[in-house]
Amino acid sequence: MSSGVGWIEVICGPMFSGKSEELIRRLRRAQIARKRVQVFKPVIDDRYSKAEIVSHSDLRLNAEVVTDAADILKKMDWRTQVVGIDEPNFLADGLVNVAQQLADSGKQVIIAGLDTDYMGRPFSPIPDLLCVAESITKMLAICMRCGNPAKHTQRLVETEDLIVVGAAGMYEARCRRCFEAGLPKQEVLEFARPQAQSRPRVAKAGS
């Protein structure tokens, strides 16, 4: 695109599909091109690092921590040309307006996040971001049950909370056939066993 024209790129898909890795790749290319880059991540996501975007393959990139979408505007250096945002699902719907403002001001905005939740439902704000984005990349993982292409994130711990921060041991990538909305049947059977057998397994998954 021409210099001074902003746009929005969305990288979406399930967990373990390489979204953060692709985000880091694009941001590093922008840095190599000597563009001013700012990277943001939600404060709640401290699984691997408090001040870095970290992929499951351990690629890392320094990031500024924000509490919500509005915080991005407060921390924005308006000389910045490229803005990277990881884990937008933790930043609520206000991110759509923020991304629009940044793109309208001439910035390249690259956002990577989940498009569906643990029930297989559209996971805000990605669906709305897809509607306003100029570029969309749909990533697929590998189903951890059968090896087919996976589009779903399967939660393995018992909770009805929409957002539960976790990684391997708490989630699996599943294909359309193997995915079960909510807690999968094999996990329900584990919870139904005597407490002495089931409790250690649950505690380990949530640690």
Image (cartoon, helix red, strand yellow):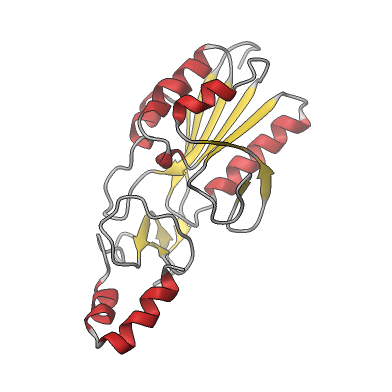
In the rendered structure, the answer to whether residue 84 lies left or right of residue 8 reads: right
Residue 27 position in % (x across, y down):
66, 35
Q: Residue furthest left?
A: 192
Which residue is depicted at the point 42% across and 36% down? 91
Q: Is residue 134 visible?
A: no
Q: Position of residue 160 (x, y in %)?
A: 25, 57
Q: Residue 150 location in percent, x, y?
A: 40, 58
Q: In this picture, is 63 found above or below 21?
A: above
- From this view, report whether residue 44 is shown above or below residue 173: above
Q: Using the image as rendered, state which of residue 124 and residue 161 is in the foreground.
A: 161
Q: Residue at x 46, y 25 (%)?
A: 70
Residue appearing at x 34%, y 35% in the figure: 127
Q: Quadrant of the N terminus?
A: top right
Q: Is residue 121 visible?
A: yes
Q: Residue 126's image quarter? A: top left
* Image location of residue 138, percent across then percent down: 45, 43
Q: Nearer the viewer, residue 154 or 135?
A: 154
Q: Nearer the viewer, residue 94 or 184?
A: 94
